[in-house]
Image: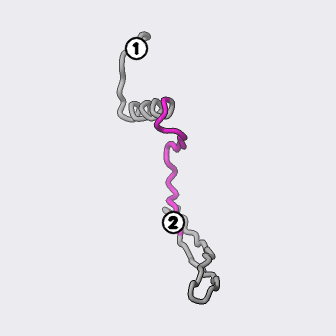
Amino acid sequence: MQDVIVSHYEQTVPFWNEAENTQTAKKITHKIATETKIPKIGVMLVGLGGNNGSTFTAGILANKKQQTWESKQGT
């Protein structure tokens, strides 16, 4: 099995030449390498500074560090 998937992307970018008042296009090639190892979790949070986002993040970190706390229902 491969460790990375490699793909090539060609992008055409417009450039403006002030001296000649003309527009030209330049092709740029990108090499994109993506690891094949799948992460355990991936979450996109909108509004991380809000109550829900920060509570969610704290819960994920507490679970990762195996932390517990007391509540009315117990540990």
- According to the image, label 1 marks what residue? 71
Residue underneath mark 2: 33
Residues 35 and 71: in front is: 71
On screen, residue 15 versus residue 74, left or right, reads: right
Q: Tell me which segment is drawn in magenta.
A: 32-51
Q: Residue at x 56, y 76 (%)?
A: 29
Q: Label 2 sits on what residue type?
A: Ala
Looking at the magenta stretch, what is its main secondary structure? loop
Looking at the image, which residue sits at the far top?
A: 72
Q: In x, y percent, where is residue 42?
A: 52, 44
Residue 10: image location, x then y, percent = 61, 75
Mark closer to the observer (2, 1): 1
Instruction: Indicate the position of residue 12 as horizontal and vertical percent values.
Output: 63, 76
Say which label, 2 or 1, has the lower sequence index.
2
The image quadrant of residue 28 is bottom right
Q: What residue appears at the point 56 percent right and 88 percent down from the top-left corner? A: 19
Relative to 17, 63 lies left or right: left
Q: Residue at (40%, 35%) from the top-left corner? A: 61
Where the C terminus falls, by quadrant? top left
For numbered disc 2, what is the local secondary structure?
strand
Q: Quadrant of residue 7?
A: bottom right
**Residue 68 counted in the magenta span:** no
How many other residues sit within 10 Å of disc 1, few (<14), some (14-19) or many (≥20)?
few
Helix, strand or loop at label 1? It is: loop
